[in-house]
Each structure stands twice: as structure tokens, then as C-alpha cells.
DNA sequence: TTGAAAGCGCTAACAT
DNA sequence: ATGTTAGCGCTTTCAA
């Protein structure tokens, strides 16, 4: 067994040498070396002396099979190491127990949490989530969606309400339940589960104004990529506007370590606009960066300057101070969406076209003073 | 379209009301309302007046088709919104362009990075990753593996070298390339790509000893769950032992916010063993928690006490001080594994049974003084 | 360049 | 309780 050592960055090969290691005893009595053709039902049928159909029944716990034959079959299947071919099964039965879950990114923490809500909820059913990632790109969303739909899943859970025309058409044509998650500000194709980000922005603006802050800076991701951040921003500024307040300064970033970006942007913004008394960040990571920076500067938080982020990232528990934030109900969203798909999958039809709007909770942490 | 509002935690329903909203113009001229039966090749064939076989050829860019028929077919397919049925295609062609990727968790950051390496590398091929999550549980790994193999993927990338006998048997029987990733300390089923965690632990121990630290505490996850953390720990303690040094204190945790845990454990350990001059953490998140805590206490770092973690999490750039760490070559591992699968998938056979060991790099950050 | 026939491995729907 | 038959929607192979 050759072993090849190389430096991490993958370029200079340090050494290639052969292991003369003792081959472990992996010839587990029954197992053939490395089969060409995977086993079929027929192999199990022959090995057990039971008809293919009955073997199939045993392996799916379907229909009545006598205890004796059942055991004969199970023994044979286990002994051979038979793994059923779901492709053939799905084609024959016209049912695929997969739920396509389409999200923008796995790096964001938010989405893995939605996912875990989904998996948890699906655990009890025979459905299984399959994840596709779009990198926030509509073209990639289209591609991923097409790819996943071509496996004829039993349902789709997809992030956001904004999709290309082609994507909408595919979703509509698919003839399966579609739940759009995370956002409720818009018209769902079928069903939506999420929070209103406009409302979230509004609520935060109200809390900030009520607490008496008035010179407010905003930092966030470059918008076109992220509709939900945009909607929060819109809700936020509109509410400020109603109170006669305008965003005093703003800055947008993309890429890089969010913590470091939050630091840099906060530094830059306060250098530019030293009179700000509140900083609203479009996510908790950059908010935490800002918070750490300001603490080092010895800023009086939340007295002379307040901070708030968005998401309620558990990751950040343990920072010296808790950032004010608003949770996005990530797990609940996942659970609810999964429950809807599962219900529709058994009921047949049930409620279609509903919108479930969850209400995010504001937590003031240590960086947003009371009204 | 009913809208249902409820509080995030999902219990008390606040309001259910009906939207009388204007239905958006989603009857996009050609699209039928909501079809029962998904479209088939035959539908496209009839709509275009071209035989099924030729339609199939056009849609796969296979074989020679005249420009005129090609366009007729493409137009029809697009107009109808045809999405090919990969289930049937896979069954007929006996090829599935999926690579099963089996990892312990999505919450860990490490694994999404491996995944992104995989996706990136597979982008150029016609292969697609499909992810399964085991929650670090061998039984779940077995289940997930069985489930994924039943879709007859073209290859498997799976984290770790430790698997149940049944899992090993399935992998062996599957007759497809299998790459075990993250770890090279053990005997791969087929091919392994990763780092030696024992060696990583050893290197860190050497660096710490060379820098003159000698009263060393260890904090980490409960071991049985995580073989790689265990191996690092073993390498670490063995190297210390050779120098006549023993771990002075240690503590293990599971669950909760890693940052907060790092804080708590560090506090507790230093209360217990105030004379420690170095703390080795099994991951960067708890290390960062400890670092934040010690800074608040005004500790002299790395003078009177040093710290180190493991992983090189980019997430943490932006902390007031950089934690000493050792990167795990996550992305490179993903890329290399994917490249091997892709190569084997085209070549037919090529190199089997190799082990690629990448070398992690130590970065001293601001918490491990020079030798 | 195009078409017709024969399955891929399984399961639904009937026998028995 | 068990077996038989006929596909599922494609692609492979061979013929035209």
C-alpha cells in the first residue's frame, strides 16, 4: 500500500514510500474479494430458495410472509451483503423518499441549523433530506434544482422567495409540495415558512429608537446577493425614516472572515463618523467583530454607543459581552417545513398555499440599553 | 392564501388570517396548472415529432443529430418544461453520477470546508456530491451508508478510518472507489487522504516543550466520539512522556457552545491547578473561549501561560489575539479525495490503495512563544 | 442521421 | 402465504 506524504498546500511532495504493513484480516469469511456486479434480488432469491417477489416483500416488510421464510431471506441477504437497488425500486414504485433541500451555503451556520431541524423532523418518517447548495447564485440554483428534480423527490424545501422564472416554472411543474423557507415577504409558489425580515428590521429600528439612539450606522453584506438582508435593511431604514431619522453612515462587505471584517469596518466607520451612537450589523459575526473592537477601545457600551446584530448565533455565547440580536427561528423553520412536506406526503393533499410566519424574538444582550 | 403567524418557539398561534392578495400572474402562458404526471421523453417526442431515441440523444448531446432536429427537440423540451427522469436513466445506463460523502456533522465547520473542497473539484466533472451526516454515531453511519449505497453512487468519500464491521463490508462489496478522509493513522479500506493526527499531537507537544513550557493542561471533547481528537491526544501525551512530562490536568466536555465551554473549563482548571503554564485545547473554538477568558483576567500570554488549539478555523481571525493552532488541511483533503474519485471514475482503475498523508502546518499565533 | 427492440432491477397488481 | 406477469422511463444495441 503506497503512502504518499506531502505538504498541506499540496505542492511539494515530501516522500513516497511503500508500506510493507501486514494486511489486516479483512477477508471476512464470506465476502468475495471485490465484486464486479452488485448483487440483485435474484441473487438473494437463489441463495435463499425463495421467489424474488417474496424476497422483495421481506426486505420491505410489506405483505404477509411466514416467519420461517422471512428468516431464511434475511439470513441470505445479510450473508451476501445485499444492498437493494433503490433506483430500480423507485422506478418501479414511482415513489422516491427524498426531500430536496436547497440552500445558499453551508458556511453560514444558519443553514446547517435549518437543516438539522429538517432532519430531526424527518427522522420519524421514511423521508430523507438531500442537500443542494446554490452559493447565492440564481443560475446555480437553477442548475441544482434541475438536477435534484430529475431524481423525482417527494418534496422541495428551498430557501427564499426569489427565484428565476425558469426555477419557478420547474417548481410549479414538478407536481410535488414546495416549501420556501426563511422568508415570508413575498408570494410563495406553494407554501412559505419563515420570518418577515422587513418586520425584523422594523422591530430592531423601533427598539433602537425607543432606547434613545439616533445617529445610526449600518454595516452588512453586499445586498444583491442576499434578499433577506436587503429586506431587513429596508424595514429598518423605513422605520427610521418615519421617525425622521436617516442612516448616518453605512458600509458593505463581501467575503473574508466576518469577525475580522466587523472589526475593520467598525474602525473605519467610526473614524469617518465619530459621532455615531448606534451600529446595526446585518449579522452577528460582524457584530461580534465590532463589539470586540469597541471593547478594546474602551468604548462605553451600551451607554454612549449601542450595537446589534442579527441571527442569534449560539456560537457566540461566551463572548465577553452578549450582542443584542434577533433570532431567525432557524430550527423551527426547518421543523415546520419538514412537517408540512411529510404531512402532504401522507395525506395526499391537505393544506396548500399557506404561509407560516414565525415571530423572531429580540434579545437586548449587553449592547442595547432599555427604552 | 392563508397566512398563519405564530411565535418562534412554535406553540401559541397568534393569528390565522386569509390573504385576499392579488394572485400574481403565475400562469406563464404555456404552463399547465399543476400536472399530475411528470413529463416523459415520450411527451417531448410527440411534441416535437421526433422519435424518443433521438430526443434522448439531443438531451444528452450524444451521437450525431442534425442541427434542425436538435433545435426542434430543444425547443419542445424547454417549452414543456421537461425535466429528465434520472432514475430511469440511471437504471438503463447503469451509471449514477453521484459521489456519496459521509461526514459526522455539519455544525463543525471543518466538514463544510472539506465539502467545499470536494464540490469545487467535482465541478469540472459530471459527478455530484451527495452528503450524509452520521452525528458521530457508528449505527447512524451504517444506516446512512446503506441508504446511500442503495442509490449506487460512483464513489464514496467517508470521514475517518474507524467503521463498524458491517460498514466495512458494505464498502468493500460496493465495488466502487472508497476514499476515507481526514485521518491516515490506520488501515484504509481502499484509499485514505488526510493528516496523521498522532503526528499532529506530537508536533504540538514538541513545539510546546521546545518553548520551555512544562506544566501542561489539556481540554477537549469526550473522546470515544472522536477518534481523531483521541489520536491527537495520544500523540501529544506520548511525546510529553518521552520528555518525562505528564499532563498536569485535563477536562472533557460534550455539547453546548464551544466558546462558552472553553471559558468555563479554563476557569475551572486554573482554579484547580493554578500553576499550569500551558493549555492545549482539542479545537480552536474552546481555545478561543479560554483565550478570551484569560485576557479578561489580565494573564500574561504567552509569557507565563501559553495556549494552543487545533484546526486553523478562519472564523476566528479577528479575535484580539491569534490562537496558536495547527491547520487540518481541510480543503486540500476534500480536493484530493474528489480528484481521486474522479480519476478512478474515468480511468477505469488506476491507483488503488494509496494513502495520501498531508502535513499540517503549525502557526504559533500570539499564544505560543518561540523556542 | 434516425429508429425499433430489448432490457436495467425492482414492485404493483393479479393470480394461486 | 407465495408466485407470475407486466411494466416504470429511460439507454444500449443493433438495424435501416
Image (cartoon, coloured by chain):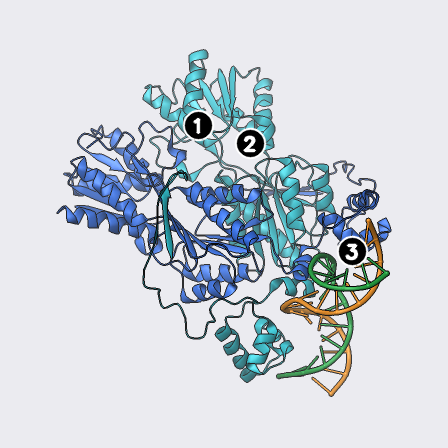
Chain colours: A blue, B cyan, C green, D orange
Q: Chain of mark 3?
A: A
Say above or below: A80 vs B78.
Answer: above
- Determine which residue is flagged by label 3: A53
Front-most of D13 and A344? Answer: A344
Left or right, B190 with respect to B363, comes to right
Image coordinates of residue B285 in percent, x first then y, are 44, 31
User: Do marks 3 and 2 share a chain?
Assistant: no
Q: Which circle, 1 or 2, is nearer the viewer?
A: 1
- Who's the residue at 38% across and 39% down the image? B12
- Measure the alpha-carbon separation of dots 1 and 2: 16 Å
User: Do marks 1 and 2 share a chain?
Assistant: yes
Asked where in the image residue B48 lies, by quadrant, the reply is bottom right
Image coordinates of residue B9 in percent, x first then y, are 40, 38
Q: Which circle, 3 or 1, is nearer the viewer?
A: 3
Other-residue count near label 2 (Cα within 10 Å), few / some / many at <14 / 14–19 / ≥20: many
Image coordinates of residue A76 in percent, x first then y, are 82, 46
Front-most of A236 and B161? Answer: A236
Front-most of B315 and A58? Answer: A58
Q: Chain of mark 2?
A: B
Other-residue count near label 1 (Cα within 10 Å), few / some / many at <14 / 14–19 / ≥20: many
Mark 1: secondary structure: helix
- Determine which residue is flagged by label 2: B200
| For the residues bearing labels 3 and 1, Cβ distance under 8 angstroms | no
| For the residues bearing labels 1 and 2, Cβ distance under 8 angstroms | no
- Determine which residue is flagged by label 1: B287
Say above or below: B59 vs A52.
Answer: below
Q: Which circle, 3 or 2, is nearer the viewer?
A: 3
Tell me the number on the disc at residue B345: none
Amino acid at each position: 500500500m503506497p503512502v504518499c506524504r506531502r505538504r498541506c498546500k499540496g505542492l511539494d511532495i515530501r516522500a513516497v514510500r511503500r508500506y510493507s504493513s501486514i494486511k489486516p484480516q479483512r477477508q471476512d469469511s464470506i465476502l468475495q474479494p471485490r465484486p464486479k456486479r452488485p448483487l440483485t434480488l435474484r441473487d438473494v432469491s437463489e441463495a435463499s430458495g425463495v421467489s424474488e417477489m417474496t424476497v422483495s416483500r421481506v426486505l420491505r416488510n410489506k405483505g404477509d410472509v411466514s416467519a420461517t421464510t422471512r428468516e431464511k431471506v434475511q439470513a441470505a441477504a445479510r450473508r451476501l451483503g445485499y444492498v437493494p437497488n433503490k433506483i430500480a425500486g423507485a422506478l418501479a414504485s414511482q415513489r422516491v423518499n427524498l426531500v430536496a433541500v436547497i440552500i445558499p451555503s453551508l458556511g453560514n451556520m444558519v443553514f446547517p441549523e435549518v437543516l438539522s431541524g429538517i432532519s430531526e423532523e424527518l427522522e420519524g418518517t421514511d423521508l430523507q433530506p438531500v442537500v443542494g447548495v446554490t452559493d447565492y447564485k440564481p443560475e446555480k440554483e437553477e442548475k441544482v434544482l434541475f438536477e435534484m428534480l430529475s431524481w423525482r423527490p417527494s418534496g422541495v424545501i428551498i430557501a427564499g422567495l426569489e427565484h428565476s422564472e425558469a426555477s419557478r416554472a420547474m417548481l410549479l411543474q414538478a407536481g410535488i409540495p414546495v416549501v420556501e423557507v426563511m422568508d415570508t415577504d413575498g408570494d410563495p409558489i406553494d407554501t412559505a415558512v419563515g420570518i418577515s425580515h422587513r418586520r425584523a428590521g422594523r422591530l430592531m429600528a423601533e427598539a433602537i429608537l425607543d432606547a434613545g439612539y439616533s445617529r445610526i450606522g449600518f454595516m452588512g453584506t453586499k445586498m444583491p446577493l442576499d434578499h433577506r438582508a436587503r429586506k431587513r435593511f429596508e424595514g429598518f431604514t423605513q422605520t427610521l425614516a418615519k421617525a425622521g431619522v436617516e442612516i448616518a453612515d453605512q458600509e458593505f462587505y463581501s467575503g473574508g472572515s466576518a469577525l475580522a471584517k466587523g472589526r475593520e469596518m467598525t474602525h473605519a466607520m467610526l473614524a469617518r463618523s465619530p459621532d455615531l451612537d448606534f451600529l446595526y450589523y446585518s449579522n452577528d459575526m460582524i457584530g461580534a467583530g465590532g463589539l470586540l473592537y469597541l471593547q478594546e477601545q474602551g468604548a462605553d457600551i451600551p451607554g454612549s454607543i449601542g450595537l446589534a446584530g442579527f441571527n442569534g448565533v449560539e456560537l457566540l455565547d461566551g463572548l465577553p459581552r452578549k450582542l443584542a440580536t434577533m433570532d431567525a427561528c432557524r430550527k423551527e423553520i426547518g421543523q415546520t417545513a419538514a412537517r408540512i412536506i411529510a404531512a402532504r406526503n401522507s395525506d395526499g393533499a391537505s393544506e396548500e398555499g399557506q404561509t407560516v410566519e414565525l415571530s423572531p424574538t429580540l434579545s437586548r444582550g449587553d449592547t442595547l440599553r432599555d427604552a
